[in-house]
Image (spheres, rainbow, N blue to C red):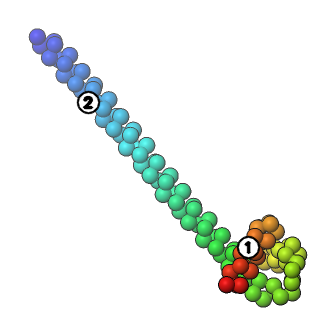
């Protein structure tokens, strides 16, 4: 009888230990997931802010220089990419932004 009680107690301790271990592992995994989600959100915000900053740089350059390029979108885009330090974008991106700029300014 005493031996059965010891076995039951040992089994209870083992189950409790396993459950606690699983709970700890789950908590750690959940914390990692939450940190990863938060970091992804921050990365998206940072990337959006950088894109907005680059767009504003291009728009400021266009305010000054667009009259020099009547109807020559490719040349304007190429010159903008060369002239603006830190833009780091392709002329195709600049062409799309110039089209957007023109549409916004015509309203």
Quarter residue 71 falls in: bottom right
Q: Nearer the viewer, mark 1 or mark 2?
A: 1
Q: Is residue 98 left or right of residue 7?
A: right
* As drawn, 34 above or below 81: above
Could you say which quadrant of the image residue 64 lies in? Answer: bottom right
- The foreground one among 51 and 20 is 51
Q: Position of residue 72 (x, y in %)?
A: 88, 78
Pointers 1 and 2 in contact (CB under 8 A)? Answer: no
Residue 86 visible somewhere in the drawing: no
Q: Residue at x 56, y 66 (%)?
A: 45
In this orientation, which residue lies closer to the viewer: 105 or 97?
Answer: 105
The local crowd at label 1, few if under 14, some if 14 to 19, many if 20 or more residues have their Cα within 10 Å, is some
Is 37 located above or below residue 67 in the figure?
above
Would residue 27 be found to the left or right of residue 73 on screen?
left
Residue 82, quarter of the rendered image: bottom right
Tell which of 77 and 14 is nearer to you. Answer: 77
- Residue at the image point whose x is 87% and y is 72% from the top: 74
Circle 1 residue: 97
Neighbour tally class for label 2: few under 14, some 14-19, many 20 plus, Cα within 10 Å: few
Task: Please give left or right for residue 28 compared with residue 13 in the image.
Answer: right
SS class of the residue under badge 1? helix
Q: Is residue 91 left or right of residue 54?
A: right
Name the element at disc 2: helix
Image x and y of residue 7, in percent = 20, 16
Q: Which residue is mark 2?
A: 16
Q: Residue furthest left?
A: 1
Residue 22, percent from left and from top: 35, 34
Q: Quadrant of the C terminus?
A: bottom right
Q: Earlier in the sequence, mark 1 or mark 2?
A: 2
The residue that appears at 53% across and 62% down in the rendered structure is 42
Q: Quadrant of the N terminus?
A: top left
């Amino acid at each position: 009888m005493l031996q059965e009680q010891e076995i039951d107690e040992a089994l209870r301790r083992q189950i409790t230990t396993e459950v606690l271990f699983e709970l700890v592992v789950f908590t750690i995994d959940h914390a990692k997931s939450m940190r990863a989600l938060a970091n992804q959100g921050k990365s998206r915000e940072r990337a959006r802010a950088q894109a907005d900053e680059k767009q504003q740089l291009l728009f400021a350059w266009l305010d000054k220089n667009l009259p020099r390029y009547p109807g020559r979108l490719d040349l304007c885009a190429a010159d903008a990419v060369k002239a603006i330090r830190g833009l780091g974008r392709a002329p195709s991106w600049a062409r799309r932004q110039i089209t957007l700029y023109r549409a916004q300014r015509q309203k």
